[in-house]
Amino acid sequence: MQRRVPIALCLIAAALLGGITVNAREAATTQKVWLSDLDISKTQQGWGEPHRNSSVDGHPLRIGGRAFEHGLGTHADSALYVQLDGRGRKFTGWVGVDDEVGRKGSVEFRILADGKEIYQSGLLKGGDSAKPFDVDVSAVKMLILLVNSGLDGINFDHADWADAMIEGVGSKPDTVHAPKEEAVILTPKPSPQPQIKGAKVFGVRPGHPFLYMIPATGDRPMTFSAVGLPAGLRLDSETGIITGSLPDKGEYVVTLQAGNALGMVQRKFRIVCGPRIGLTPALGWNSWNCFAGAVTAEKVKAAAEAMISSGLAQHGWTYINIDDFWEVNPGATNDPTLQGPQRDDQGRILPNPRFADMKGLVDYVHALGLKIGLYSSPGPLTCGGCVGSYQHEQQDAERYGEWGFDYLKYDWCSYGQVAPRNPKLDDLKKPYLVMRAALDKAPRDILLSLCQYGMGNVWEWGAEVGGNSWRTTGDITDSWGSMSGIGFAQDTPAPYAGPGHFNDPDMLVVGKVGWGPSLHNTHLTPNEQYTHISLWCLLCSPLLIGCDMTQLDAFALNLLTNDEVLEVNQDPLGRQARRIAQEGSSEVWAKPMEDGSVAAGLFNRDEIPRTVTAKWSDLKLSGKMRVRDLWRQKDLGTFDGRFETEIPRHGVVLIRLFPAE
Ligand code: GLA
């Protein structure tokens, strides 16, 4: 029999022992808390915002025809950290894809308790019935609620934690942010000795202006020379800029040389004069992810200057691309800098007042040894509502050529209003065929970047319509869910990438980004940023820096200037990495390199550290291999059969495997 303690005694004890007794009293009552009544704003997700008691699109929660009153509407990839500190007892509810996406979308729900998986839903698809879960969370300190996009990307992955309820004792659980990470710079600084960097192959069309600045690191002043430079080309020995033009088709192997007070180096460089351009993925900057509608000519000029002054150009970074908002925006009537005549009396496109001297801007960027790009849409309006190229394609291409542009991003946008309602493959191809043909009439090389978010499996025909790259996805944002959801869904398009035509999983989100006038540091953690750059290099994606170039910090600069990492992207074979192994949230992606070595990324998509293994049998290798860590630029030793290592949350180890001597 239990002895009853008089209430008065309890009160005295409470006064003496403070919290302990209060806790004891709380323990007597079990409370039920809807997950949606916690602070769900700390949910990280790949798209949209977390919603309380409604789907990510704001509709009442509904899974497989069943309505739910309470719950968290989120979007893969999603993570919410719930701090229970032992106060929880039970976590119950239903999971599934919200009915608002119909039969689209596929996700997997997981629950981690202090790093251990205690629930996994298996793959749930749009239209599937809601799946109940009921897990014991007693003694758990930290619960992590995860929604993974699976292997097929994040499109339509509207995920509901429906009627999700935590039973427990004591005060309501808190939601917290994922642990902070220190931004560790892994890569040693380039040596002061001269070293030639960048792509080893370069394509140009006969008779077209040639512009190439030899990328080289090392102390300045530096002098450049070239042995075997074909007639028609000349090299400025002080700047390392090669200009001129090649009259005839052909391949030329040139020996580039760079010297400074500490020595001299040389490297072979292959110039291929023929129809194909963009033989390696474009390396550059684009205004959208930082400035979006706030771009100006001054900001573009500053980006070009920073490309030089930051040293990025010494690693092969070349393009300065103006995205949307250089044109007049008929709808933005309250912004005089976006107003003005849209075209001249002959129908030729006119820039808005922010870009009053387009030719001057282009010449300025070229004089720095860099190239420059711009943006348009085959529709009447661009995605931002500016003037597009519809029914002016030839004229616009001519104009870009006259101004001297080297790159066009051509974005579907309002073309949807012009194209047939349910566009067939030919309808999808048409605007790009038209623009490619128009650009080909210009007397210069203009890369064509297709942007239509992957419609009609664009990777299957992007090269055929003359695209040098094609976006395979919707727009990226600086969240783990968005970046990883996009990046790890790039296996299907992989076989279609090759020299001159690459898959484009969208632009980089490292550094200070913001899509408008105000910028913030990327929301990706340091490890997520290493994953982002490693993956995009393995994917042979165009690398277009999306941050304010004038505010690059040491960490961002390090991410973008590791030549061994960039070499994976710029390898002349142009073969995109495939996912060669996957186990839970661990993935290994690998690509063959021209020299017979293999580049591989060991990725951990989980919230907790994991050991990831690259097996020779998956890599199609045999025998002893020398393994080099590319971020640290350090040999890790000789391995046989497998290489395995522990990878932090959302992190990567990027390696290159060479046959051991
Ligand atoms: C679309 C594209 C973006 C950007 C904007 C500009 O959303 O996908 O990359 O170019 O348009 O409006």
Image: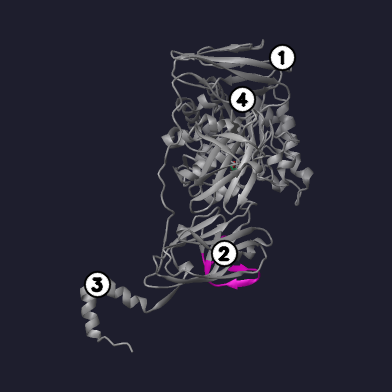
Mark 4 CB within 8 Å of ligand 1? no
The reply to whether the magenta stretch includes residue 405 is no
Q: Residue at x 71, y 26 (%)?
A: 276
Residue 201 at x, y percent in the picture: 64, 23
* Disc 2 from disc 1: Cα separation: 61 Å
- Report the mark closest to the observer, 3 or 2: 3
Q: Residues within 10 Å of mark 3 (few under 14, many from 20)?
A: few
Report if the CB atoms under discs 1 and 4 are less than 8 Å apart. no
Say which amino acid is labelled 3: Gly
Residue 650 at x, y percent in the picture: 51, 48
Say which amino acid is labelled 2: Asp
Residue 318 at x, y percent in the picture: 56, 27
The residue beneath circle 1 is: 247
Say which amino acid is labelled 1: Pro
The residue beneath circle 4 is: 403
Q: Earlier in the sequence, mark 4 or mark 2?
A: 2
Residue 22 at x, y percent in the picture: 29, 74
Look at the image and tell me in which quarter the N terminus lies.
bottom left
The residue beneath circle 2 is: 160
* Disc 3 from disc 4: Cα separation: 77 Å
Look at the image and tell me in which quarter the C terminus lies.
top right
Which labelled disc corresponds to residue 18?
A: 3
Say which amino acid is labelled 4: Trp
Horizontal relation, residue 103 to residue 218: left or right: right
Mark 1 CB within 8 Å of ligand 1? no
* Disc 3 from disc 2: Cα separation: 41 Å
- Report the mark closest to the observer, 3 or 4: 3
